[in-house]
Image: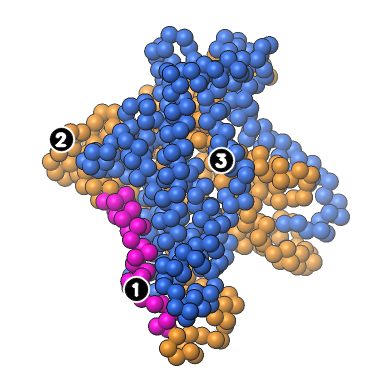
Amino acid sequence: MTIPSALSQPGFRRTRRINTALLALYMVYALVPLGYLVVSATKSDKQIFSTFGLWFGDSNNLGANLVSLFAFNDGIYLRWLANSLGYSLAAACGATLICACAGYAFAKFMFAGRSGLNRVLLLSMAIPQTVFVIPIFLMLSNVGIVNTPLAVILPSLAFLPGVYMLRIYAEEAIPNELLDAARIDGAGEFRIFGTIAFPIMVPGMLTIFLHTFVNTWNNYLLPLVVLNSSENYPVALGLANMYTTTLSGGITTPLYAVILTGCLVSLLPIVLLFLIMQRYWQSGLTAGGLK
Amino acid sequence: MAVSQSGLPEGFTVRSLPGRKARRWPDGLTAYLFLVPAFIVFGGLIVYPLIDGIATAFTDRVIARGGKFVGFDNFLALFADEIFLRAAYNSFWLTSLVVLIKAVLGMTFALVLAQPMPFRGFFRALVFLPWAVPGLIAGLAWKWIYDEQVGVLTYLTLALGLTDVPIYWLSDPKVGLISVGIAMVWHGLPFYTMMFLAALTAIPAELTEAAAIDGAGPIRRYFSVTLPQMRNVIAITVMLSTIWTFNSFHMVYVLTQGGPANRTQILPTLAFEYGIVRSQLGLGAAVLVSVIPIFLVLIFILTQRMLKREAD
């Protein structure tokens, strides 16, 4: 809403002051919890309990915390990070491909049951995911893959909003003339998809990739239900487990500072990904809504 | 749209080109082949679990035992269960208020961030950061901030003289749910700001300029030009966020575990408690199946809006 004429209005100065104040408040609210993590990662356990949470202590313990973090239980933290990365990559690649194929089919083909399927798809998007957790656990245990990486990866493949988003994307980005020209040249449908449609859909697919990657990285309830041995944990579940063990006195030396350092370290890949790809983050989300 | 459904310019329809139609939609079979992976995922991870979940809700199933059909017993037990009623009440108010606050604040900050200002890109990136934080870590960070002995918030309210006695952010039955809500708003707000900001910047400047020339003030311009243009985005954002907020298991689980005395229990945490912790799968499933009717209404509104696109 950039209105040049507004700049000359008398209320502009006041509006700008209100804007600055609002923005400052929002920054505090948005950044305090993150600042707390950063500051705490530099403290010892004793300092966490004896110094003000949002300012540094008199000595820097970040190095020592990192060493204890990666040495904890023979380096299981690194294993958790690797698990999270593996689960998220596998789920994101799989879900993106599934959504791309389905979105393309909905956008560019007419087939029996198209509008009915479309409606069912949209309907199912709104059923709370938590409804599925117990049945999925039962199903996975029947198949016998509870407590394996597949138990986390398979259920994470279902990202239905992605089908809708990529469908809108394909409708708007892929000109039908291009597909027709390829058909007239005698290219098969799968070749057309692979060589023409796929490259055009890449930006939209990146959005879906990011979403499923972050959703899987951040998912807590599903791994909590389907995994039970700590070497399979993703990093969030591992840290939570470490935390409850510390709380219940199961670990002789308290590890609060180490756990908070672990939280900070596990945030870095996601925040990095988020900042680098911020453009794609939004594009797919709003594609369906802006029309 | 200047281009018709077929992708051809207006007035140059498929019908005017005899024989093209068969070519345009080569055959249904190809489409189904593209849909096979989605069908498998949809059937295996949505349809089957949903049916199984609903069926389980009508049994006395326990982990490792099949369970027999018990009719509406689980639901009757739940509606007589004070904890379930409290959890339903909490879920309703928590979801509605958190969504409302996120929508109002999200709109406010989207309007602020749409204004020209120095370092705007940098500020935008910073305020979006909480969205990238895993829910569990967000929960842990807030847990420390709320801590009654060493928490930053407790320290500040005492140091600034806002209260004489420490506020028990998580263990006071009256405050617990509010604290959970504050943390949930923190985590979900960037999504709203992001969506609303994208919608705001997509509104053609000519529209607001024309209104300004016609003498409409900023408030009038907002309500009669900007807001109607954002209707679709607002609807989709609120619908999706309502579902996500309702599902927000981790925040309650990490911050209060539903305590003290179930005062902050919500339906997802209660389902986990009954179904997984106490192994009463039937009862646990019934907790969430009982809200499906409410979501069906929401779903209906959502799909009406999304499907309307096609009619246009």
Q: Which residue is mark 1?
A: B28
Q: Which residue is mark 2?
A: B65
Distance in Å between CA atoms under marks 3 and 1: 40 Å
Q: For residue A58, which quarter of the picture? A: top right
Q: Earlier in the sequence, mark 1 or mark 2?
A: 1
Chain that bears disc 2: B
Colour assigned to chain A in the rendering is blue
> Which element is circle 2 on?
loop
The mark lying in front, picked from 3 and 1, is 1
Which image quadrant for residue A269? Answer: top right
Q: Is residue B123 above or below residue B252?
A: below
Q: Is residue B47 magenta?
A: yes
Q: Find residue A95 and report its horizontal and vertical position in percent.
A: 42, 51
Which residues make up the magenta segment? B21-48
Nearer the observer, A184 or B131: A184
Q: Quadrant of the N terminus of chain A?
A: bottom right
| Cα separation between marks 1 and 2 | 44 Å
Q: Are marks 3 and 1 in contact (CB under 8 Å)?
A: no
Rendered hue of chain B is: orange
Q: Is residue B174 visible?
A: no
Q: Residue at x 78, y 58 (%)?
A: A3
- Specify whether disc 3 shares its chain with disc 1: yes
- Chain bearing tag 3 is B
Q: Earlier in the sequence, mark 3 or mark 1?
A: 1
Q: Between tags 1 and 2, which lies in front?
A: 1
**For residue B40, what is the image quadrant?**
bottom left
Task: Find disc 3 in the rendering and name its residue.
Answer: B131
Residue A154, magenta (yes or no)? no
- Circle 2: residue type: Arg
